[in-house]
Image: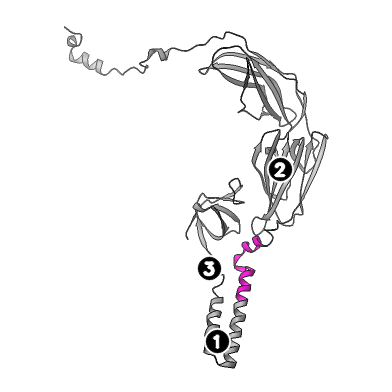
Amino acid sequence: MSFAASLDDKQKQIYQNIAPSDEMGNYEENIKDTYIATSSLVLSAKEYKKQYFVGEVFSLELSAKTTENTEFDFELSFNKNKELVFLNPEAKWQKNGDEYNIKLYFEAQNSNAKLESIEVALSRNKEVFQRSSLLLEPLNFKRVNADKNYSQIVANDLSVKRTRTSYFDDKNLMMIVELRGENANLNDFHLKDETLIEQRIDNVRGDFNSSIAFYSAIFAPNKKSLDFSYFNLNTQKLETLSIAVELSADESVSTQSDLNPKNNDLVFYKQLGLWIVAGLCFVFFIFKRSYIALGIAILVLALSFFIGTDTQTGVVKSGANAKILPTANSTYFRTSKQDEKVEVLAKRQNYIKVLFEDGAIGWIDEKDLQEN
């Protein structure tokens, strides 16, 4: 007689209600893979300076030596305070025989920054099987004796490659500055200038040895120049740069007329020309009694009132971003919180230049514009 047959109905019901096990069917996969280190992990660092300036980008070159003959991952941790920023957490270790090298970049946010030690751990299957620490000699950080135009940049060199000034809206100007820095963190660029309505840094490219970025600032048109300084590590002093506020050649005329398309001078001159033609036809009619001339005069006069009335309008979708320039890397300066009526000013590739009801002008993606 089988075991199942020997159970009464109540006992069978109990066995049917037992929940299935959540253990994996493959018992070998449940066995923990514990790896035991077969060698030591030795850490060392190349010679480094002991004193830096606040805002200066500095690096530590670290070496880890191990003869472990297995696959493993590196895990980094630091005994530091929050005033010291680790700048390149995505850095990769480079293998050279049984030695692994990495270059770590840091920056002190104030003179109280501390970095006491670096710990490296080796892990396999997310389990650490070996770790080692490297004690560092004390690092000191000195504040820059800054002036009112200080840009928060400490660098071997900071230069201006190109600038462009244009109308941001009907009340303010916008300047875009292409910066190039050596041994600098251009993300830090910021001016404590009360005349600036808005400022930002975008599109930082390169590495800390050499990088470029685009700084943009919005200000009133009565501003004469954009002045800023940075601390030069080579000369050990502040260097000052000044950029005159001058409208770019293709913006001084075309953008102003774009700000108020209904007052475009070209439209006025076209209308004036048609009125002159109509007037001459009327004079010809009076003296020659030519009804053909009268008909032409009436037709031309009527046509003159249709010039400039074909303004195209549309609606920018809610959530659409407006850019400063019609390029992929341009800065977004506003996001529509709801559908907005706009006037279409121009089109370039996949971007459309629009005039918002509050006077702001920007470029939007053509897919974000719908018919009114």
Amino acid residing under circle 2: Leu
Could you tell me residue 95's position as x and y percent? 62, 20
Q: Which stretch is magenta?
A: 253-272
In-front residue for pair 115/93: 93
Cα distance in 3D space between marks 2 and 3: 42 Å
Q: Position of residue 265 (x, y in %)?
A: 64, 69
Name the quarter where the N terminus is drawn: top left
Mark 2, other Cα within 10 Å: few <14 / some 14–19 / many ≥20: many
Q: Residue at x 43, y 12 (%)?
A: 31
- Tag nearer the camera, 1 or 3: 1
Label 1 neighbour load within 10 Å: few <14, some 14-19, many 20+: some
Dominant secondary structure (helix, strand or loop) of the stretch shown in magenta: helix
The image shows residue 90, relative to residue 296, as above or below, that is above
122 and 82: which one is in front? 122
Query: Pointer 1: what residue?
Result: 293
Q: Are marks 2 and 3 in contact (CB under 8 Å)?
A: no
Residue name at image x 52 percent, y 87 percent: 292
Query: Where 235 sits versus 358, above or below?
Result: above
In front here: 255 or 10? 255
Q: Would you place residue 88 above or below residue 68 in this image?
A: below
* The stretch drawn in magenta includes residue 260: yes
Mark 2 = which residue? 179
Q: x%, y% of residue 294?
A: 54, 87
Tag of residue 310: 3
Answer left or right for 75 relative to 28. Answer: right
Q: Tell me if 61 is positioned left or right of 305 in this view.
A: right
Mark found first going from the N terminus, 2 or 1:
2
Distance in Å between CA atoms under marks 1 and 3: 28 Å
Q: Quadrant of residue 157?
A: top right
Q: Secondary structure at mark 3?
A: loop
Name the residue furthest top: 1
Which image quadrant for residue 26? top left
